[in-house]
Amino acid sequence: MKILLKSVMRALSIVTVSPLLFIDLLLRPIAGDGAFAACSQFLSLFPGKTGSYLRVAFYRMAMRSCAEDTYIGFGTLFSQRDTVIGSGVYIGPQCNIGSCHIGKDTLIASGVHIMSGTGQHRFDDLETPIRDQGGQFDMISIGEDCWIGNAALVMADVGDGSVIGAGSVVTKDVDPMSIAAGHPARVLRSRIRDAATET
């Protein structure tokens, strides 16, 4: 019964967001990711599980890939449509997510920001305003079965099975099965070593 109810909710959600999908498709040649981001902002305002169903229904059609069993919390915004979200992913409320690939079974806590790399804004030319200097957007990879703590800022890849402490700033790649924290984040220990010690 629960599986049937979820299927019905997913189908109804697709029907409900279809006008937004049409708007996004219509404005994509003119506005690029701007229309997608605007739809994301609108959908972020719907609370609870119903809101998550609506957001996931839209992203399944508008993003490169989004698994149907994803949960996306209230107030979470996506800015780039080339994002990939794997199966069983939980994304908490008030997150801001750029271009990234999030592996299956990963948990992202509240207020996490995943930037599109560290080079989004250039500022080398002193004669040109920073806003006019452009930048480079990179695809960030968050591995499978990771835990990203509250209010972390992620600007580099995080390997499978890693844990990022709350409030950490990740500026360099984190190896798989690592526990990292701090400003900037550094690896504190390996989960593999911890597991070996326990056994």
Image (cartoon, rainbow, N blue to C red):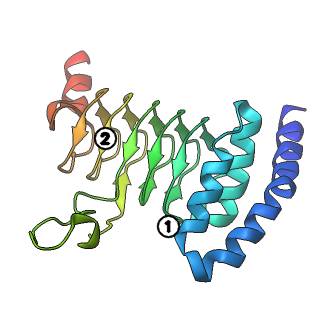
Quick check: 115 left or right of 105? left
Q: Tell me the kind of residue under disc 1.
A: Asp
Query: Secondary structure under badge 1?
Result: loop
For label 2, the crowd category at 10 Å Cα-Cα, with few meaning under 14, some 14 to 19 and many 20 or more, is many
Looking at the image, which is closer to me, 70 or 25? 25
Looking at the image, which is closer to me, 173 or 58? 58
Looking at the image, which is closer to me, 191 or 64? 64
Residue 90 percent across, percent down from the top left = 55, 37
Using the rendered view, name the quadrant where residue 58 is placed. bottom right
Q: Residue at x 22, y 45 (%)?
A: 174
Residue placed under numbered mark 1 in the picture: 82
For label 1, the crowd category at 10 Å Cα-Cα, with few meaning under 14, some 14 to 19 and many 20 or more, is some
Quick check: 20 left or right of 162? right
Q: Residue at x 74, y 47 (%)?
A: 54
Residue 142 percent across, percent down from the top left = 37, 49
Which disc, if any, is residue 19? none
Q: Tell me the kind of residue under disc 2.
A: Leu
Q: Residue at x 47, y 30 (%)?
A: 110
Q: Residue at x 53, y 33 (%)?
A: 92
**Residue 108 vertical placement versus 159 (above, below):** above
State the residue lying farthest toward the bottom. Answer: 29
Residue 133 percent across, percent down from the top left = 23, 72
**Residue 7 vertical placement versus 2 (above, below):** below
Residue placed under numbered mark 2 in the picture: 153
Q: Is residue 24 visible?
A: yes
Query: Secondary structure under badge 2?
Result: strand
Q: Is residue 134 visible?
A: no
